[in-house]
Image (cartoon, rainbow, N blue to C red):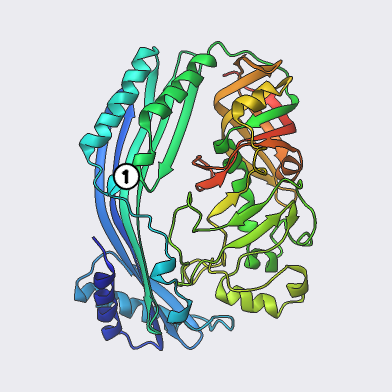
């Protein structure tokens, strides 16, 4: 397993071979294992341990990267030679920043612990026992279960010739379950660095209940409905907007936030932060250059407040005519590994819930709804119009009609065409934020939401 000492030794070997002005090394990888099941049977069990060493060299304003997964001296020497050869033939980049110094890396005391023995020591037998419990629940309900139970133990290190050293270890456990009936399905998914927080049987019970309750689905006319979106549905929708909260995206004029920063864009009940140190978050506390990730307030009470920045992007923004229009411009530690065209993005989203005492459970949202639709999750979401964030997609694995404050049975799935901006203007109620996993976006901390006038445009035949 990679540790800080091993990473330092690898870097010293790379540096021995390098002739470049500056050298940066990114080492990442770990142990990954997955148990896959379908038709109530485990049909695949795989495990892999792999690490990569990605070497970036700099000659003046020219930079390039070469990557290998072999760590013997000859392989590292060749990777250094490749990176240097490619660097020399690049066009100089006037915006390229010098390598980050050690003062920009996070301190160990400021780095959250995300490594748990519960996940690191998870065995194939442990995962098989979890799947066995899931399958038993499926059989008890005359359903068929499919899904995965995976675990990982990984590490990431960034070191450079300026003396920067950034290191992070993390574990992960994830369960995803689809319960299939004759004409219905239910789904649940959860991921956490701590395997003790992943409850396969609870997830299976919920997925089975959704499959049973949505049996014999009926059709209702498409149109605008009050919807109750469970957290997975919320994150898969809002995930489409966060790459726009990047300084480079605004500089390139490809962000829906161009000309909107500092203005009220969403409802007053919408506040969003990026915070890698939030108790329910995960991930390294540094970016692709080893720079400390800072918490950033993206939206406050519906007003777009700030963007995130890599080091080079912050400097470009300060010199841009847009500088006075985008809130505070500072290095926030959200850059991707260089070289890249994207710049940066917030990857540790926390959407705040309502004030204390005002959060509503999904059941309470249902009870307060005269007629609406409860959505477990969405899929096949695509962006139709980027500036208004018009999205299209479909419901899946647990779509229910709500009438007179109660679930009135399953519905055939809908296609929706919905502006994300309008959706976040129409939020009537929210739950407590939870760590949520979906299929279209990265994990986030988000609440369930009750949203008025959500636009369904078509009904499927299933």
| 88 relative to 220 in the view: left or right | left
Image: 311 above or below 442: below
Residue under numbered circle 1: 151
Look at the image and tell me whether residue 100 can be seen: no
Q: The N terminus lies in which quarter of the figure?
A: bottom left
Q: Position of residue 335 (x, y in %)?
A: 53, 68
Image: 338 above or below 200: below
In the image, what residue occupies the spot 78% across and 59% down? 260
Q: Position of residue 263 (x, y in %)?
A: 80, 58
Residues 116 and 309: in front is 116
Q: Secondary structure beneath disc 1?
A: strand
Image: 444 above or below 44: below
Residues 249 and 88: in front is 249
| 359 relative to 64 in the view: left or right | right
In the image, what residue occupies the spot 50% across and 84% down? 98
Image: 79 above or below 118: below
| 179 relative to 307 in the view: left or right | left
């Amino acid at each position: 397993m990679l540790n800080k000492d091993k990473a330092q030794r690898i870097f010293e070997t790379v540096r021995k071979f390098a002739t470049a002005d500056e050298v940066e090394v990114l080492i990442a990888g770990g142990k990954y294992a997955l148990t896959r099941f379908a038709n109530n049977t485990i049909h695949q069990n795989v495990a892999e341990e792999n690490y990569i060493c990605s070497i970036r060299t700099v000659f003046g304003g020219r930079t390039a990267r070469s990557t290998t997964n072999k760590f013997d001296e000859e392989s590292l020497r060749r990777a250094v030679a490749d990176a240097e050869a490619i660097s020399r033939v690049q066009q100089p980049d006037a915006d390229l920043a010098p390598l980050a110094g050690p003062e920009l890396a996070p301190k160990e005391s400021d780095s959250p612990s995300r490594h748990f023995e519960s996940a690191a020591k998870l065995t194939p037998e442990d995962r098989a026992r979890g799947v066995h419990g899931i399958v038993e629940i499926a059989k008890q309900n005359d359903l068929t279960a499919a899904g995965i139970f995976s675990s990982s133990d990984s590490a990431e290190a960034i070191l450079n010739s300026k003396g920067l050293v950034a290191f992070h270890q993390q574990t992960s456990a994830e369960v995803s379950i689809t319960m299939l009936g004759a004409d219905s399905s239910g789904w649940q998914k959860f991921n956490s660095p701590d395997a003790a927080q992943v409850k396969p049987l609870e997830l299976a019970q919920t997925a089975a209940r959704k499959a049973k309750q949505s049996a014999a689905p009926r059709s209702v006319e498409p149109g605008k409905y009050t919807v109750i979106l469970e957290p997975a549905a919320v994150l898969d929708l809002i995930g489409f907007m966060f790459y726009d909260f990047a300084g480079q995206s605004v500089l390139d004029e490809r962000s829906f936030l161009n000309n909107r920063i500092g203005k009220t864009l969403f409802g007053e009940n919408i506040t969003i932060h990026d915070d890698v140190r939030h108790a329910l978050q995960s991930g390294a506390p540094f970016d692709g250059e080893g720079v400390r990730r800072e918490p950033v307030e993206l939206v406050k009470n519906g007003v777009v407040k700030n963007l995130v920045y890599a080091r080079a992007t912050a400097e470009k923004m300060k010199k841009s005519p847009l500088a006075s229009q985008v809130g505070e411009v500072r290095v926030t530690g959200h850059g991707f590994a260089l070289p890249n065209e994207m710049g940066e993005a917030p990857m540790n989203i926390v959407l705040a819930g309502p004030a204390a005492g005002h959060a509503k459970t999904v059941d309470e949202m249902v009870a307060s709804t005269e007629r609406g639709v409860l959505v477990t999750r969405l899929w096949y979401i695509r962006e139709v119009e980027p500036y208004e964030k018009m999205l299209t997609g479909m419901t899946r694995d647990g779509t229910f009609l709500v009438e007179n404050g109660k679930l009135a049975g399953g519905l055939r799935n809908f296609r929706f065409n919905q502006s994300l901006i309008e959706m976040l203007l129409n939020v009537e109620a929210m739950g407590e934020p939870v760590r949520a996993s979906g299929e279209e976006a990265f994990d986030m901390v988000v609440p369930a939401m009750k949203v008025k006038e959500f636009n369904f445009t078509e009904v499927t035949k299933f």
